[in-house]
Image: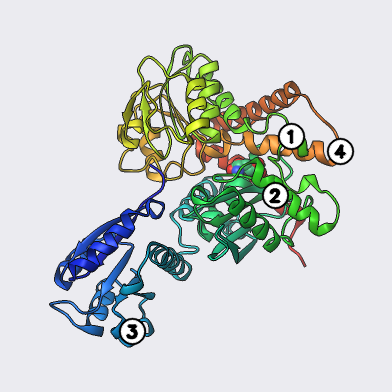
Amino acid sequence: MSDQAVNILLIEDNPLHAKLVVRLIEGEPQLRCTLQSAETLADGLAILHAGGIDLVLLDLVLPDSQELETFFRVHTAAPEVPVVILTAMDDLKLAATAVEAGASAFLVKSSLNAVALGRAIRYTLARARAHTAEWDSPMLRLAQQQFLKAAQIMGLDDNIRQRLLFPQRTQVVTFPFFRDDRAQVETVFGYRVQHVLTMGPTKGGVRYHEDVDLGEVAALATWMTWKCALMNLPYGGAKGGVRVDPTVLSSNELQRLTRRYTAEIIEFIGPDKDIPAPDMGTNEQVMAWMMDTYSQQVGYTVPTVVTGKPVVLGGSLGRREATGRGLVYMIEAAARHTGLDLNGAPAVVQGFGNVGSFTAKFLEEAGAKVIAVSDVSTGLYNPNGLSIRSLMDYVAENRVLKDYPEADHLTNAELLETKCDVLALAALQNQVTAENADRIDCKILAEGANGPTSLEADETLNEKGIMIVPDVLGNAGGVTVSYFEWVQGTQNLTWTLDEINGRLKQIMLDAFDRTVARAAKDGIDMRTAALVEGVQRVTEAKLLRGVFP
Ligand code: GLU
């Protein structure tokens, strides 16, 4: 469902060498690669022409093509696909010339091992992305299209429109961290993007995921701006990220990565500047390390530099569950609005991380029957309702839902198309698209993830009369309780859980009511209405502050 495999094309005529590569890749599940093989250049080019290949592993000496000619023909067929040369020891010079001519790297076959191959693949893809795709992300296109649609409907001043389209500040860093063997140093890309500085400090999570790039972080920062403005929080939007797969790192590796990332962006963040929080792939522990690293640098403890910390370090009660809780408040409000009785209503939750698991739990508590859930490992289905307590216990022990016994298994596509009343999307972006939107069979679609629905899909869902609770409204519970955490921290207050949940509910219901009213008044869909509400507030503030100098 989530983590896309890397599609590798191996063009190699020597069966022994081909077998070795297949064995290394298959033995390295962390790489998450799928491999297609060809023994001749002609067969390789045919696969390449069919599309979908992310990287080519290429032997330059093939039955139907020799030496540099082989590289040039592959490179011309797909200039954007990076090529790693597989070379014999006595052909090193040729391989080096191919690298000069545009190949990404070469690997010597006689010393090929899983570590070398894995690193070559990871770094080649990272480089290709740095060269071509940092800003060019589907998520940024989506965030900008959504904004432009709202701007069009509001008749937004063109000066403001241009100002809000791209983030105000972006920081791109690369930094190293030691793997546990103390032999390998990984160098990774990190980002912190601040979209709008007009409203106060900037605010937003930090994401660790192997697909993170500048465009994705910029899109997420943009959504944070609209989300904070819609909730009337005194923040502009920000987001951070590191392009790394955290699931393959040990806790020590994660700690070293987090501390170095924090050190790299330290000038950018601060309790009055920009306040990070958890997002996908990060958690309370990561926030504790960030807070500690920042505090060590300034020389005293600064709990308010991050939110989503452990409670014992100044975190807020209710923050851990806040995004799921807020989403269920919004589902309840949407159900009241559409006249749906949640009692016994079949519900499906995509994603079983922090947001998905708490969404499922609170949906169950609200009386809904959660019939399907999923995570990156599998989907589970039980028409009589799943026990969320038991699923949470299972995940606490086994990390993922795979092999959970008391349910049928289903694919991500099947899960999304399962007939239900409430579909909560709490996994990744880009899940409901033009391709599957007409098969979505629910009454309320609630977005816990950021950007899970494409613009084309929105149109289809709206035509079908599905009530959408858009991400900037649906998942705003997280940043709202982050705001409570920051307020408590800056004023040395401690609020009770009831106070926190009560305030959260009040703020979110107010935003829901304003969104519904705006949608009705302007005859627009819920997402556009939520964005118009947010953009309006930011616009007003920008006009009042004026342009410096
Ligand atoms: N990462 C969360 C979001 O996307 C929370 C951000 C925060 O608490 O600052 O809304």
**The label number, if any, that marks residue 322 in the structure image:** none
The label shown at residue 491 is 4
Contact, mark 2 vs mark 1 (Cβ under 8 Å):
no
Quadrant in which residue 96 is drawn: bottom left
Q: CA distance from mark 2 to mark 1?
A: 14 Å
- Give the residue type that dot 2 points to: Trp
Q: Which quarter holds ligand 1?
A: top right
Residue 193 location, x and y as percent? Answer: 62, 57
Q: Which residue is mark 3?
A: 92
Query: Residue 204 in the image: x percent, y percent?
Result: 64, 47
Q: Residue at x 81, y 39 (%)?
A: 489
Instruction: From the viewer's perspective, tell me whether residue 215 is left or right of residue 103.
Output: right
- Asked if the residues shown at circle 3 and circle 4 are in contact, with their CB atoms under 8 angstroms apart, the answer is no
What amino acid type is highlighted by mark number 4?
Answer: Gln
Residue at the disc numbered 2 = 289
Q: Residue at x 60, y 33 (%)?
A: 323
Marks 3 and 1, how far apart at CA: 57 Å
For image coordinates 81% across by 36% down, the residue present is: 488
* Residue 218 seen in the current view: no
Chain-order first, disc 3 or disc 4: 3
> Which residue matches tag 1?
311
Cα gap from disc 3 to disc 2, whole angstroms: 44 Å
User: Alpha-carbon distance for marks 1 and 4?
Assistant: 16 Å
> Which callout, 1 or 4, points to the residue nearer the camera?
1
Residue 55 visible in the current orientation: yes
Q: Nearer the viewer, residue 202 or 150?
A: 202
Q: Is residue 411 left or right of residue 211?
A: left
- In the picture, residue 42 is in which quadrant? bottom left
Q: Earlier in the sequence, mark 2 or mark 1?
A: 2
> What kind of element bears circle 2?
helix
| Quarter assignment of residue 533 | top right
